[in-house]
Amino acid sequence: MHKIAVIIVKAFCLVFLTGCFTPQQLVAAGRVDQPLNSERSLSASAHKDLADTGSGQEGYQLVYQVVDPYDNMDSRLPATGHFRQANFEGENVSQDVRQVADWVVGSGDNRRLPFVIIDKTNAKVFVFYPEGRLRGSAPVLLGLERGDDSVPDIGKRAMSDIRPEERITPAGRFIASLGRNYHGKNVLWVDYNAAISLHPVVTNRPEERRLQRLATPTPQDKRISYGCINVPVKFFKNVVHPAFTDTNGVVYVLPETRSIHEVFAMYNIDKNQRRQSAVRTNARKKRPSSGRSGRYSW
């Protein structure tokens, strides 16, 4: 009887002590197995929805916001299936732009960096804060020829040697950074090896009427460059340059001859599949290119 009483007392003490520990303390002590899925939900600090929308003299729209720090943001996919989306601040965009932007934000593909989406079909650029809120948008001038692949070694050739059918703005995912071109002008290098950059509109050839082309609403008028992405001067100064100052970023150039799923290793974010797709994709193919200085701007 004495032995039985001792056993009962020990069992009671063990239950009492166990109740005094938190789950975290038990895990630290090695008493509880940790969950197999340790992914945390994507989250960003609360931010103020302060927007001032206006149009500049060159016919582009600027969206300015005040954004709080996002130090708590986790770039990994949400284990709960909660899908974060890009915030376009009410601007109308194409389905492809919205789908790619939602994928970038939901998957964290931009790795907490500012990112840009180039819609070649509609000749527009969208610049985003790292957490996925629209910073600004504008019309763009693009390569003269439709296509999604640069000619091999085109960055090594003189402009005079480039044929009209070779003047293509390539599609893909690029690591971008600010730099200077051959003439010492500020540019955002998109694909340095192919000498492709995003820069203020070039006006040294009046016969090309680039400023007038930027001001029209027709995408067909925007095909004139040698492959570079021309934006309004004020847009580069007030939106692009501040976004990429002291940091790299990611530029997504949407295709025009292939589907976005062929160019980007993205998952389907259809409304009926967002929960499943948000937790199943970890590996994504990337097409990085490094930014440098010393090339031409076309």
Image: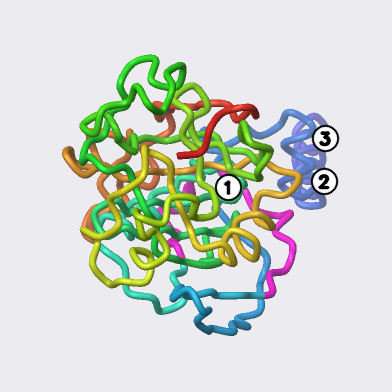
Mark 1 residue crowding within 10 angstroms, few (<14) / some (14–19) / many (20+): some
C-alpha separation, residue under disc 1 versus residue under disc 2: 30 Å
Frontmost of labels 3 and 2 is 2
- State whether residue 75 is above or below residue 222: above
Residue 140 image position (x, y, % from top left):
39, 57
Q: What residue range appears in magenta? A: 66-86
C-alpha separation, residue under disc 3 versus residue under disc 2: 17 Å
What residue is disc 2 on?
A: 17
Which comes sooner in the sequence, label 3 or label 2? 3
Amino acid type assigned to the residue bearing label 2 in the image: Leu
Residue 56 image position (x, y, % from top left):
53, 79
| Number of the label disc, if any, that sits on residue 40 | 1
Mark 2 residue crowding within 10 angstroms, few (<14) / some (14–19) / many (20+): few
Mark 3 residue crowding within 10 angstroms, few (<14) / some (14–19) / many (20+): few
Which comes sooner in the sequence, label 3 or label 1? 3
Please tell me in which quadrant of the rendered image residue 165 appears: top left
Q: Is residue 102 in view from this perspective? A: no
Secondary structure under the numbered disc 3 in the rendered image: helix
Which comes sooner in the sequence, label 1 or label 2? 2
**Is 138 positioned to the left or the right of 69 in the image?**
left
Specify whether residue 5 is painted magenta.
no
Amino acid type assigned to the residue bearing label 3 in the image: Val
Seen from the viewer's position, the closer of residues 165 and 16 is 165
Q: Residue at x 52, y 33 (%)?
A: 36
Seen from the viewer's position, the closer of residues 99 and 137 is 137
Mark 3 touching mark 1, by CB under 8 A? no
Could you tell me which quadrant the C terminus lies in? top left
The tally of labels here is 3
What residue is disc 3 on?
A: 6
Q: Residue at x 49, y 41 (%)?
A: 109
